[in-house]
Structures are given as C-alpha cells and as structure tokens.
C-alpha cells in the first residue's frame, strides 16, 4: 500500500516512521525540509508539495497544526482534493474544529473521496512507541479499511461516530487534560513550597485519589521523570500554543451550545497568559513556570 504523509512535526514524523518500519511505501511532505530529509534517509520519498505526495497514494494522512492548515491543504488550490487519485482514502489526524472536519469531509465525499477525522492522544512518546489512541469519525466501513494502517501507529482505535465525532472526543479529552496539567502543577508547587521532594510527593499522589496522566506519565516538575519534556527544558512534546488552540476549540463549542465549562475557560486563560509571556513553543507542562520560576 502506498501512503502519503503530510505534516512531519513532533507527532507526524514518528507516526510516519512507524509506517515505514511496517513496510509501507511512503511519500512525504512538510514545509520544513529537514523533517523530510530525516525520513528520506530512512526510505521515504520526499516531495515538493502535498499534491505531489498525494498523487500515487492509496491512503493520504495529514498531521497538521490547526483548522486553517487542514482547510488549505485539502481544499486550497493545488490541494489534496484535486491531486488525490480516484479511490484514495483521506485521513486527517490533526486536532481541529469539529465543524471544519465536517466541512472538509463533505467536500471530500462530494469529490468522491471517503474521509475520516482521526485525531490522536498519547503524546510524542505514544507516537514514537506506536501506542496512540485514535478517535475516529466517519463511516464504519472506511474505519475498517484503514484499521490495519492505524494499528501500526496506535494501540487503541475507536470509532466515535459520524464525521466530526472524533474531533469532539478529542476536544473534550484535551480540555480535561489542560485542566489536569494546570491542577497538577499547582498541587506540586504547593507541596514543594512546603518542603516536600517533588518525586516523593508525585509518587504518593500517584497512588492516591489525585492520580492522573499529567502526574503519572508527563510530570511537569523538572527531574521527576527523566523522559518527560519537563526534564528536557520543556522542549518538543505538545506545545503551549497547541493546547491553547484546543482549549479555544472547547470554549467555542461551549459558547455555541450554551454549555458551562468554567474550568476549561480558566485553563484557557492560564495557557493564554503563559503564551503571551513568550512560552508558546514550550511543552504545555511548562505551565508550572507560571507558578514557579525554575
Ligand atoms: P508540530 O507543530 O510539531 O507539527 C506540525 C507540522 O505541520 C510542522 O512540521 C509544520 O511544518 C507542518 N505544516 C504546517 N503547515 C503545513 C503545510 N501547509 N504543508 C505541509 N506541512 C505543514 O505539531 P504536532 O505537535 O506534531 O501536532 C500536530 C497536530 O497533532 C496538532 O493538531 C496537535 O494539536 C495534535 N496533537 C499533538 C500532540 C503532541 O503531543 N504534540 C498530541 C496529540 C495531538
């Protein structure tokens, strides 16, 4: 099977690498040449545009930052809908607005291409290990057609419902994650200010009722977890600006439906402040620095 992979950032590159390792033929494109040359050295074909990458592909995967990038790559001049070959299946793994996912999927299907929204969870470590969770929206039979491919990049593949449903799950999950990371940073900062070793505090809370993924897998305190972004100067990982985007998606959805999300709104305010202070490119666990200058 020939795969096109577009968007080779913190997530896309390790996901594409897992497909290469599984023996798929890959054509890749990113605006950053270095990301492409890394994969070309491992056997992928580097292309000069998304359209070129798409032309031969049976399945086209995209892993782009936000809604506007997805709209442009699929619907723009020289985009995927005019370059994909007949019968190709389109799978967008980016986290974007559910309404945009539905709009792009409708345009794709009108042009004759089955499409899925398939955002992921599990972070860059999950992308590298091939253990991501996929939350998929679209027709069940299309999900089954690409399931073997998704299983090379993820361990849990869930069909959430029709177009946009994957994005709704992802939006809810990330609103909860943004709140949990800010709350975890707040609790650790309080304990350390009162003399606790952050490792001891984390270990005890991990076996207590405050346990959560931010504390146990992605600890925001530098040095508590060797492989967490906090211990690498908050480099790589999941950017503050990407978390801010996701909390914005949740807030827009809450406003549109008149649903109260006071904790999500508060978390969005914290990440917006942190970004405004110049930290947008750091990993989102650096929200700790709003409370504690390390
Ligand atoms: P990233 O910023 O590291 O990577 C995005 C890549 O897209 C970059 O390499 C960029 O050059 C490329 N790109 C942008 N516009 C392009 C275009 N027009 N054509 C080709 N390439 C283009 O972001 P990321 O962390 O890899 O995240 C990607 C998506 O996955 C986002 O929607 C994010 O919210 C979501 N996500 C991220 C994580 C994480 O832990 N980083 C986890 C789950 C989901």
Image: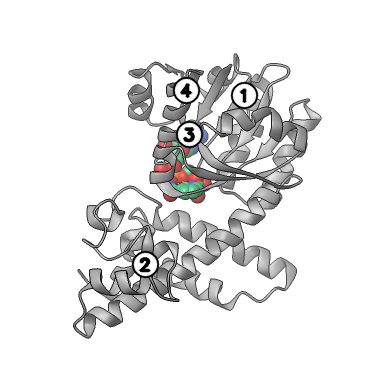
Asked if disc 3 is less than 8 Å from ligand 1, the answer is yes
Q: Which mark is residue 59?
A: 1
Q: Residues within 10 Å of mark 2 (few under 14, many from 20)?
A: many
Asked if ligand 1 lies within 8 A of label 2, the reply is no
Q: Position of residue 252 (x, y in %)?
A: 64, 64
Q: How is the image coloured?
A: one colour
Q: 105 or 218: which is nearer to us?
A: 218
| Residue 275 visible (yes or no) | no
Question: Is there any visible trace of residue 283 in the rendered image?
Answer: yes
> Dot 1 surroundings within 10 Å: few (below 14), some, or many (20 or more)?
many
Name the front one of labels 1 and 4: 4
Frontmost of labels 2 and 4 is 4
Tell me which residue sits at (44%, 29%) in the image.
18
Dot 1: element: strand
- Which residue position is annotated with label 2? 274
Residue position for label 4: 22
In the picture provided, is 57 more to the left or to the right than 191? right
Q: How many marks?
A: 4
Element at badge 3? Answer: loop
Q: Give the CA separation, mark 4 to mark 3.
A: 19 Å
Q: Is residue 20 left or right of residue 160?
A: left
In the rendering, at what x and y percent does residue 219 appear? Answer: 33, 62
- Classify 135 as above or below 274: above
Q: Are marks 4 and 3 in contact (CB under 8 Å)?
A: no
Quadrant containing the C terminus in the rendered view? bottom left
Q: Dot 3 corresponds to which residue?
A: 7
């Amino acid at each position: 099977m020939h795969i096109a992979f577009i968007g080779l950032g913190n997530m896309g590159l390790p996901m594409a690498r897992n497909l290469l390792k599984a023996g798929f033929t890959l054509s890749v494109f990113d605006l950053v040449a270095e990301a492409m040359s890394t994969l070309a050295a491992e056997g992928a074909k580097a292309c000069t545009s998304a359209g070129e990458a798409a032309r031969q592909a049976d399945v086209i995967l995209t892993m782009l930052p936000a809604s506007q990038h997805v709209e442009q790559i699929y619907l723009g001049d020289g985009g995927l809908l005019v370059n994909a070959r007949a019968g190709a299946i389109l799978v967008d793994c980016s986290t974007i607005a559910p309404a945009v996912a539905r709009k792009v999927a409708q345009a794709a299907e009108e042009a004759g291409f089955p499409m899925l929204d398939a955002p992921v969870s599990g972070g860059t470590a999950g992308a590298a290990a091939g253990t991501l969770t996929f939350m998929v929206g679209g027709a069940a039979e299309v999900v089954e057609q690409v399931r073997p491919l998704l299983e090379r990049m993820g361990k849990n593949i869930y069909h959430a419902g029709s177009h946009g449903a994957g994005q709704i799950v992802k939006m809810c999950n990330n609103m909860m994650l943004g709140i949990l990371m800010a709350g975890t940073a707040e609790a650790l900062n309080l304990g350390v200010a009162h003399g606790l070793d952050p490792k001891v505090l984390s270990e005890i809370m991990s076996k207590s009722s405050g346990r959560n993924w931010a504390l146990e897998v992605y600890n925001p305190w530098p040095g508590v977890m060797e492989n967490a972004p906090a211990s690498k100067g908050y480099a790589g990982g999941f950017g503050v600006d990407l978390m801010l985007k996701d909390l914005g998606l949740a807030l827009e959805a809450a406003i549109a439906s008149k649903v109260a999300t006071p904790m999500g709104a508060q978390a969005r305010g914290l990440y917006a402040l942190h970004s405004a202070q110049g930290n947008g490119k750091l990993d989102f666990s650096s929200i700790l620095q709003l409370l504690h200058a390390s």
